[in-house]
Amino acid sequence: QFPFGRRLPCDIYWHGVSFHDNDIFSGQVNKFPGMTEMVRKITLSRAVRTMQDLFPLEYNFYPRSWILPEEFPLFVDEVRVMKDSDPSWKPTFIVKPDGGCQGDGIYLIKDPSDIRLTGSIQSRPAVVQEYICKPLLVDKLKFDIRLYVLLKSLEPLEIYIAKDGLSRFCTEPYQEPTLKNLHQVFMHLTNYSLNIHSGNFIHSDNANTGSKRTFSSILCRLSSRGADVKKLWSDIISLVIKTIIALTPELKVYYQSDIPAGKPGPTCFQILGFDILLMKNLKPMLLEVNANPSMRIEHEQELSPGVFENVPSPVDEEVKVAVIRDTLRLVDPQKKKR
Ligand code: ADP
């Protein structure tokens, strides 16, 4: 920490939020210029959609999405056409405010006319997306996967994926969406920050139980049920690579503008958090990418009403310490020199 400014150049600069270093001329910075902007819900949806238009089969791991408010008429039209051509199609959609996180402002709808197009949506653009109704369940609960990905270099493109991640569980048994249960966040949204407030949340010191588990424990369960875990991993790897490829052209523009070629500047790397949902048929679907994934290895526990204490979370520690340790090993400047 340099509360009064830096005097000596560093090998590695580790920032909490985003790239903001126009006064660094060497070393490595743990953020890419423009990454925060590129992974916002609207920009990510646009970037993936550009690729979906070019390579529809390769990019079928991202739910069909529309950008609000500008594509609201298109959304209404496309849904009407799809319903006309298949009257048995009874979709659900999820509306997510741009730049939101931790489930903030998210809601489910059955029909485009249910979108809250009043004041707030105008001031707060959003993405509306097809809701994946048939997720894979474990212990009757919906869960998602947080995987940590190191983008070590843009040119040449170098990507590392951590072998373990986190699985974050809902706290109410899952039912397919109906008008009656659409509002039940503990059933439909897997965010830790929401489910922690459910009376059913289980803090776990064991990787195989509780509301937050390691992804490897889920893979073990799936493999013992006969699932093809190798194929699942290879689908996940290809999802990660294709997503980063979709972001690359614009990231290079940001990079060029902040760190022009030929001028002294740092190189960049970044740990990204990929949020992935497994469908019942084990197909991984991308939900979102986080440019600043939480590296906390503690959670808050309410000792008595209103009195909180930070206690270690072994599951977070197991996964996140390894991610940071391996990242530092991979970007080790001594290794580069050798
Ligand atoms: P946030 O940044 O607010 O966490 P997300 O895009 O991650 O927003 O969505 C929050 C949660 O909503 C996800 O963790 C997941 O449980 C659920 N979710 C998001 N998109 C979908 C979808 N298309 N289908 C099913 N569930 C979804």
Image: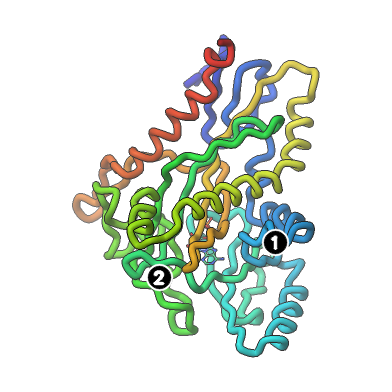
Percent x, y of residue 91: 59, 79
> Which mark is on residue 187?
2
User: Which label number is shown at residue 282?
Assistant: none
Residue 57's label in the rendered image is: 1
Residue 97 in percent (x, y) is at 60, 61
**Circle nearer the N terminus (2, 1):** 1
Which residue shows up at 66% across the image and 69% down it?
Answer: 119
Residue 107 appears left or right of 298: right
* The furthest residue to the left: 304
Relative placement, left or right, of 91 versus 251 is: left
Type of amino acid at the residue the image marks with label 1? Leu
Name the residue nearer the viewer: 304 or 264.
264
Please state the horizontal and vertical placement of residue 314, each as a whole percent of the image: 29, 41
The answer to whether any part of residue 324 appears in the image is yes
Marks 2 and 1, how far apart at CA: 30 Å
Is 258 situated above or below 71? Answer: above
What amino acid is labelled 2 in the image? Met
